[in-house]
């Protein structure tokens, strides 16, 4: 089976190396941040799909964070299957879904899945779609990787739509030095050389007597 960029599937599993991808590391990879994506060990069957079907990742924000927005992965996979997706797989409890879909399905999928999750589970959850080719592009276009930055300080926030005109220019690039960000298309690339939360905790601690 081939993905949208000619990658292969081996023994019923997506092989990142076959797609020219490095396996994802939880928080610390160039893909970490807004929503976490894992390519390693995602189950997918080896059935032959329509030649027009494309491999997608669905990124669901805020699923199963502690007691909030609890959804079981089998139930989540069922939502996608009933929406017309094929070979649906999920990764642990992350809320990330990998599947195949034809254009007629994918064009309306984000809105449909968001509505169905709210209907079935009572959670309002943004759903963002990226093809495997787009995810490779996210790595390729990372401006901080181009600078030679270490992967463990890089994060990406995935946006559902392109920012409104002027929205990017209105952001303050010096808000959290030495950390920086760069908006490219529907991705916000962040280099976090100083952990913002850790720094905030240090500032909030009382001085030693």
Image: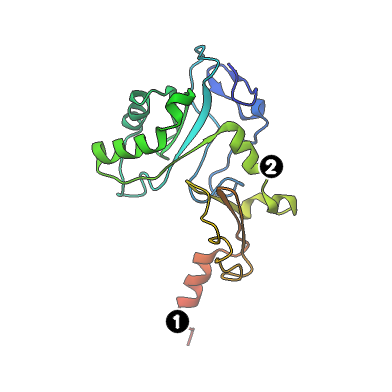
Q: Which residue is mark 2?
A: 140
Residue 124 badge: none
Question: Are the residues flagged by discs 2 and 1 in contact, CB closer than 8 Å?
Answer: no
* Residue 4 screen position, x and y as percent: 60, 25
2 vs 1, front mark: 2
Q: Earlier in the sequence, mark 2 or mark 1?
A: 2
Cα distance in 3D space between marks 2 and 1: 44 Å
* Residue 194 screen position, x and y as percent: 60, 65
Q: Return the residue nearer the eye: 113 or 166.
A: 166
Vertical position of residue 158 compared to residue 116: above or below: below
Q: Secondary structure at mark 2?
A: helix
Residue found 34% across the figure and 50% down from its top: 66
**10 Å crowding of disc 2: few (<14), some (14-19), many (20+):** few
Left/right placement of residue 65 relative to residue 153 reads: left
Residue that lies at the very extreme toward the bottom in this rendered image: 209
Vertical position of residue 78 compared to residue 194: above or below: above
Q: Secondary structure at mark 1?
A: loop
Q: Return the residue nearer the eye: 88 or 208.
A: 88
* Residue 192 screen position, x and y as percent: 60, 60
Residue 206 badge: 1
Total residue callouts: 2
Residue that lies at the very extreme toward the top in this rendered image: 48
Assign the N terminus to one quadrant of the image: top right
Residue found 61% across the figure and 32% down from its top: 133
* Residue 28 screen position, x and y as percent: 58, 49
In the rendered view, how is the structure colored?
A: rainbow
Vertical position of residue 110 compared to residue 34: above or below: above
Left/right placement of residue 53 relative to residue 6 reads: left
**10 Å crowding of disc 1: few (<14), some (14-19), many (20+):** few
Residue found 65% across the figure and 49% down from its top: 151
Q: Return the residue nearer the eye: 165 or 98.
A: 165
């Amino acid at each position: 089976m081939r993905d949208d960029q000619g990658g292969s599937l081996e023994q019923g599993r997506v092989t990142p190396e076959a797609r020219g991808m490095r396996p994802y590391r939880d928080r610390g990879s160039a893909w970490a941040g807004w929503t976490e994506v894992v390519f390693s060990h995602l189950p997918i069957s080896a059935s032959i799909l329509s030649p027009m079907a494309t491999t997608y990742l669905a990124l669901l924000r805020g699923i199963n964070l502690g007691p909030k927005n609890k959804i079981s992965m089998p139930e989540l996979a069922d939502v996608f299957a009933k929406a017309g997706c094929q070979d649906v797989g999920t990764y642990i409890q992350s809320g990330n879904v990998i599947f195949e879909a034809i254009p007629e399905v994918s064009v309306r999928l984000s809105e449909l899945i968001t509505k169905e999750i709210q209907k079935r589970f009572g959670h309002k959850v943004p759903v963002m779609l990226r093809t495997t080719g787009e995810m490779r592009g996210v790595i390729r276009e990372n401006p901080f990787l181009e600078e030679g930055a270490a992967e463990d300080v890089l994060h990406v926030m995935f946006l559902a739509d392109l920012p409104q005109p002027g929205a990017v220019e209105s952001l303050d690039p010096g808000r959290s030095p030495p950390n920086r960000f760069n908006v490219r298309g529907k991705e916000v690339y962040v280099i976090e050389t100083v952990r913002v939360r850790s720094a905030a905790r240090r500032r909030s601690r009382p001085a030693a007597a």
